[in-house]
Image: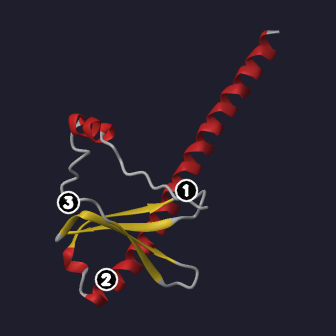
Amino acid sequence: MKKIFKIISIVVIILIIALVVIIYAGKHMYLNYQKHEEAKIKEKVHRVLKKKGWEKRIKTEEPTFTLNTGYNYLEVTYKDEPYNTYQYDVDDNGKITGDANLKDKYNKYWNNKKKREKYKKRHHFDEKYDLK
């Protein structure tokens, strides 16, 4: 009985170690693939921005890649427009496209809780149509 218990415990320990090694290797492979895809989009976008002369204006950039959806884009903020962010991605034809997220310069209603609550209580315009 003791011999069987020792064998089973050794097998369980080996399986746990193997599982940990497989999880670690999978995580490492995923992170390497993510870095590779983010570097590819960053390089492609930088090539286009350099042609247009916008590369020196970049304040921050953050590449994002999602394996589940395959969505890969680069989010860029420029020095002269710190409140606006631009998302550049590559479409199916290999062309760089961009979307802008324009924000209010001072973000006047969302900076503090008191102003946010005051904004929520305000009467907002309701659009109603009479279709008779």
The structure residue drawn at horizontal position 38% and vertical position 73%, both measured from the top left corner, is: 42
**Chain-order first, disc 3 or disc 2:** 2
Above-or-below relation of 50 to 131: below
Tell me the residue that label 1 is attached to: 29
Label 1 sits on a secondary structure element that is: helix
The structure residue drawn at horizontal position 28% and vertical position 88%, both measured from the top left corner, is: 52
Task: Estimate how packed mark 1 is, as few (under 14), some (14 to 19) or many (20 or more) residues with alpha carbons within 10 Å.
Answer: few
**Chain-order first, disc 1 or disc 3:** 1
**Marks 1 and 2, Cα distance to the nearest angstrom?**
30 Å
Question: Taking 99 as reference, is 49 left or right?
Answer: left
Q: Position of residue 97 (x, y in %)?
A: 45, 79
At label 1, the amino acid type is Met
The structure residue drawn at horizontal position 20% and vertical position 60%, both measured from the top left corner, is: 105
Tell me the residue that label 3 is attached to: 105
**Residues at marks 1 and 2 touching, judged by CB atoms closer than 8 Å:** no
Above-or-below relation of 41 to 113: below
Foreground: 36 or 57? 57
Label 3 sits on a secondary structure element that is: loop
At label 2, the amino acid type is Leu
Residue 49 tag number: 2
